[in-house]
Image (cartoon, rainbow, N blue to C red):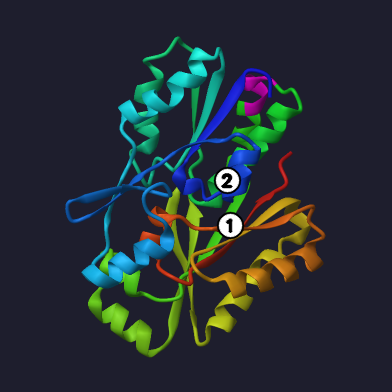
Amino acid sequence: MGNLKIFADSTCDLPSDWIGKYDIGIIPLYVTFDQQTYKDGVDLDTPMLYQKVSETKKLPKTAAPSPADFIQAFTPAINEGKDILYISLSSELSSTYQNALIAATEFPEGQVRVFDSLNLSTGIGLQVMKAYRAAEAGKSIEEIMDLLHRTRPQVETEFVIDSLDYLYKGGRCSGMQNLVGSLLKIRPVIKVIDGKMTPAYKVRGSREKALHQMLDNALARIDDMDNDLIFVTHSLADEDADQLKSILQEKTGAREVAISKAGCVISSHCGAKTIGILYTKRTS
């Protein structure tokens, strides 16, 4: 790794043991219920989030780290003589990226690089791991940035939302849509396109049908898939995640299919039982 320290924020949803193993710096976003504010993954975990939603009957507000938060997080590494690469949550979804850019100006020019993932959850995590492995292989920061620019548009992020409840509570669908969707068992599928959460299609019927559709979509891209790393990311859907991992491992022959759990910020927008398959297509 040389003198490079890689940072991400709590929305990258990397497995906690990976964060320690690969020495990834994590900067938490904030989750606020009424007057009480928590740091995502530090003061509040996902089961606690759902308990509080159940108690309060409303969703929390989420907020980006401030420039001061970034400065505080970056300073120890800078004082150790390291350069920093921070890979952020999509600038289309949060001010996290902009606040990191502000913080970077407080350090000598070029010492802090900020890269907009234009993604969320392990769509960020995939890019973090690409950067880490390139740095471990001795690539320069310029080579790593070039790799990230080539990798970013190749990231495929697709999630099945189990219920419209959280989209309704978050103002992303109407009460009538929520009612009709619940009656007809409609499960929306969300993709990340150009850095934004975009409804891709809807599956009417059982949860299993929706999961099979998402799995089929991924397997249809096997020839284009970079099978170095595939993520199955979920919010309290352990059994489904295990099943998807097993099938993906068998069908793709990927070097690694990893399961990760969605943190509080991602879960607060999608709800329990949300599950996704995330991978990158091959770059030229």
Which label's residue is closer to the chain start, 2 or 1? 2
Q: Extreme bottom residue here? A: 183
Give the residue displayed 23% in from the left and 67% down from the top: 58
Is 141 colored magenta in this rendering?
yes
Res. 85 in view: yes
Q: Extreme left residue here? A: 35
Q: Extreme top residue here? A: 108
**62 left or right of 245 in image:** left
Q: Which of 272 and 105 is in front in this view?
A: 272
Bounds of the magenta span?
140-144
Q: Nearer the viewer, residue 20 or 190?
A: 20
Mark 1 lies on residue: 260
**219 left or right of 78 in image:** right
Quadrant including the C terminus: top right
Q: Pointer 2: residues within 10 angstroms few (<14), some, or many (20+)?
A: many
Kindly report the distance in space between the C-alpha atoms of the residues bearing marks 2 and 1. 10 Å
Q: Nearer the viewer, residue 79 or 5?
A: 79
Give the residue displayed 47% in from the left and 20% down from the top: 76
The secondary structure making up most of the magenta span is: helix
Q: Is residue 145 above or below residue 282?
A: above
Is 270 colored magenta in this rendering?
no
Q: In this view, does 229 lie above or below 147?
A: below
Q: Is mark 1 on a helix, strand or loop?
A: strand
Locate residue 238, reporting x and y percent: 58, 70
Kindly identify the amino acid type of the residue bearing the numbered disc 2. Gly
Mark 2 lies on residue: 125
Locate residue 31, reporting x and y percent: 31, 51
**179 left or right of 284 in image:** left
Locate residue 240, reporting x and y percent: 60, 74
Q: Do the residues labelled 2 and 1 touch (CB within 8 Å)?
A: yes
Q: Pointer 1: residues within 10 angstroms few (<14), some, or many (20+)?
A: many
Kindly identify the amino acid type of the residue bearing the numbered disc 1. Ser
